[in-house]
Image: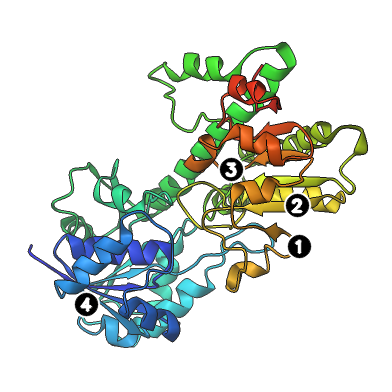
């Protein structure tokens, strides 16, 4: 099988990366979106998200004539061999995934699909969603396949082109083979299974990774209680090949667009099928507790004056480094708790300009966003590291000591060297560190 004609519905984080990378592999890709302004920006070469290497991949594919952007999905799917649904699946009030965008997209493209086309669920969807799309399409001549994404924000392009595995779920072996063939040129095992198993793999993978983070945060709390150093503990357990060191970095908790939504959805999916996933409930509870522990550390750092009226200088707003994504950011959860307690928050993040005029303005309301790290710390009673941006690791600690009103540093990412912080005349408190 040579190059295929692909349509990608949705140009968000998953859709744009998927379309650009498939075009990079030699396929002809049309990416469609309902937002005309966004489509026009993409046509002009403007990438709406911070994602390493994505701008180059998009530019090269467009220049080669293999990638284009259109408004609306009808024209995109008319000649497509395979159509990828990459639309949002937001969390409902009950923790379940909202499939309304998937259903609307399927209903819109159904009349325009060519006979023999394959429709692929790329979005993270609950178990049984393949059948939902089949029911909406009402096309016996079109196969529906599950092909979950495993992209990490900040390394999405590398993850797509060098994945640990490609998972394909289908009850139609021929359709599964057609989707698998799209990944030729990528050196990774391809796991072909049934749709329900493929959909479960995605949720289970994210649930397990969230569990590792919650576990190490709980271990960090224990280290503080018994006088151990979590850095040494992690080095010891991470060296075990059965465990591995990935996702064993203590911090303020997990966040972003996937882990919070998927962990709660995993609990809800299990509940809907009669299983009480108490372990996953515990993972979520530990994550909530971790954010509260960070707030307590900041409260202790400002001392007797308490948080009411205290000025807290925050470094980092995004849920992790390498992205501009603020969704479910633990930094914002901590800041919200600080402000509820009466603290004034000054903050800096490399991806958040002081004058925010886009969709992020709402979630940042009430935060004094400043143009540099030192500006955020000026006159603050405590400095708090909440996102692990590399520039914070090399910050001039003498300059930090000079601009702070207080002398406390709360390093919620264990990014700084405690000895160097103390040598600058500052007090240091990390996560699980002596």
Q: Marks 2 and 4, Cα distance to the nearest angstrom?
A: 50 Å
Res. 293 visible in picture = yes
Lateral position of residue 320 relative to residue 195, left or right: right
Question: 10 Å neighbourhood of mark 4: few (<14), some, or many (≥20)?
Answer: many
Which quadrant would the C terminus be assigned to in this image? Answer: top right
Q: Which label is found at residue 80? A: 4
Residue receiving disc 1: 366
Give x and y (percent) for residue 264: 61, 50
Q: Marks 1 and 2, Cα distance to the nearest angstrom?
A: 8 Å
At mark 4, the secondary structure is loop
Question: 10 Å neighbourhood of mark 2: few (<14), some, or many (≥20)?
Answer: many
Lateral position of residue 224 relative to residue 6, left or right: right
Give x and y (percent) for residue 293: 75, 34
Lateral position of residue 417 relative to residue 30, left or right: right
Name the residue rendered at 43%, 48% in the picture.
202
Instruction: State which mark lies toward you, 2 or 4.
Output: 2
Is 87 placed above or below 377 here? Answer: below
Q: Marks 3 and 4, Cα distance to the nearest angstrom?
A: 38 Å
Sequence-wise, the earlier of marks 3 and 4 is: 4
From the viewer's side, name the closer residue of 112 and 342.
342
Disc 4 and disc 1 in contact, CB within 8 angstroms? no
Residue receiving disc 3: 254
Name the residue rendered at 29%, 76% in the picture.
140
Sequence-wise, the earlier of marks 2 and 4 is: 4
């Amino acid at each position: 099988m040579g190059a295929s004609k692909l349509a990608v519905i949705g140009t968000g984080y998953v859709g744009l990366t998927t379309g650009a990378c498939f075009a990079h592999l030699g396929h002809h890709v049309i990416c469609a979106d309902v937002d005309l302004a966004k489509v026009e920006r993409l046509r002009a070469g403007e990438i709406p998200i911070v994602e390493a290497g994505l701008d180059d991949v998009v530019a090269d594919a467009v220049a080669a004539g293999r990638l284009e952007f259109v408004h609306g999905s009808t024209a995109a799917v008319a000649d497509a061999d395979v159509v990828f649904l990459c639309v949002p699946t937001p969390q409902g009030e009950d923790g379940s995934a909202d499939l309304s965008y998937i259903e609307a997209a399927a209903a819109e493209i159904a009349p325009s699909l060519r006979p023999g086309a394959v429709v692929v669920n790329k979005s993270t969807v609950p178990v049984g969603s393949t059948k939902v799309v089949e029911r909406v399409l009402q096309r016996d001549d079109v196969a529906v396949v599950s092909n979950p994404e495993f992209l990490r924000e900040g390394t999405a392009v590398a993850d797509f082109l060098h994945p640990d595995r490609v998972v394909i779920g289908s009850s139609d072996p021929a359709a599964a083979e057609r989707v698998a063939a799209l990944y030729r040129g990528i050196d990774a095992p391809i796991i072909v299974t049934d749709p329900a198993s493929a959909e479960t793999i995605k949720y289970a993978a994210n649930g397990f990774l969230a569990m590792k983070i919650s576990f190490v945060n709980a271990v960090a709390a224990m280290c503080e209680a018994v006088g151990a150093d979590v850095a040494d503990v992690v080095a010891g357990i991470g060296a075990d090949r059965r465990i591995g060191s990935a996702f064993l970095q203590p911090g303020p908790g997990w966040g972003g667009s996937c882990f919070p939504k998927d962990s709660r959805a995993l609990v809800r999916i299990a509940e809907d099928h009669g299983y009480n996933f108490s372990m996953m409930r515990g993972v979520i509870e530990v994550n909530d507790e971790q954010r509260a522990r960070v707030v307590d550390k900041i409260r202790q750092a400002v001392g007797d004056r308490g948080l009411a009226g205290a000025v807290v200088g925050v470094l980092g707003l995004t849920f992790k480094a390498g992205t501009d994504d603020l969704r479910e950011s633990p930094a914002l959860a901590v800041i919200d708790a600080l402000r509820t307690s009466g603290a004034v928050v000054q903050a800096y993040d490399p991806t958040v300009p002081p004058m925010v005029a886009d969709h992020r303005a709402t979630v940042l309301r009430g935060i004094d966003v400043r143009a540099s790290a030192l500006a955020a710390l000026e006159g603050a009673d405590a400095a708090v590291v909440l996102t692990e941006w590399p520039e914070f690791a090399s910050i001039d600690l003498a300059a930090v000591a000079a601009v702070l009103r207080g002398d406390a540093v709360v390093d919620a990412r264990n990014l700084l060297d405690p000895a160097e912080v103390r040598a600058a005349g500052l007090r240091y408190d990390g996560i699980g560190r002596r």
